[in-house]
Amino acid sequence: MDVIRGDGSLLTEIDLAPANDHQAVIQNIAVILDTVQGSCPMFRDFGLPGSLYGRPQPVVENILVGYLYDQIEEFEPRAQVADIAFEHDAATGRTIPIIYLEEVETDNE
């Protein structure tokens, strides 16, 4: 089971030619988690909504679960999500989504 944290740590060194499909899927999900919806020209539906900033944590979590499942299903259909959890950074007030992948479908299977 793979764990993808939405804190941007996986995006410090982006690999433009990942060694395999598994690494590509993980990197693509990390990009979804770190992109604000509307910030990509010609691709405005990609990412998470910026309208959630400043809202109460329980509300953000409930809305984000649906958005995360939808975004991963639409933009990275090779990933099968097992669970979604959240971590809270009290110092910054940031809610960090954590995605648990059950499986990654590759061309080899």
Image: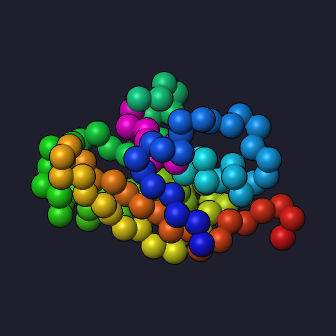
Return the x and y of residue 75 as percentages of the image width and height.
57, 50
Q: Nearer the viewer, residue 44 or 47?
A: 47
Q: Nearer the viewer, residue 32 or 44?
A: 32
Please determine whether, in this image, residue 107 is positioned above or below residue 11: below
- Number of numbered discs visible in the structure rendering: 0
Return the x and y of residue 32 as percentages of the image width and height.
49, 46
Name of the residue lying farthest toward the top: 41
Left or right: residue 96 versus residue 59 is right
- What's the residue at 43%, 38% (across, down)? 35
- What's the residue at 37%, 57% (across, down)? 97
32 falls in the magenta region? yes
Q: Nearer the viewer, residue 55 or 93?
A: 93
Asked whether the viewer can see residue 16, the reply is yes
- What's the residue at 18%, 46% (across, down)? 91
The C terminus - image quarter: bottom right
Name of the residue lying farthest toward the right: 108
Please determine whether, in this image, residue 14 is positioned above or below residue 5: above
Return the x and y of residue 29 as percentages of the image width and height.
54, 51
Return the x and y of residue 42 as percentages of the image width and height.
52, 27
94 falls in the magenta region? no
Color theme of the render: rainbow
Bounds of the magenta segment: 30-38
Please determine whether, in this image, residue 96 is positioned above or below residue 92: below
- What's the residue at 18%, 52% (across, down)? 90
Asked whether the viewer can see residue 75, the reply is no
The N terminus - image quarter: bottom right
Q: Which of 88 and 107 is in front in this view?
A: 88
Left or right: residue 84 versus residue 88 is right
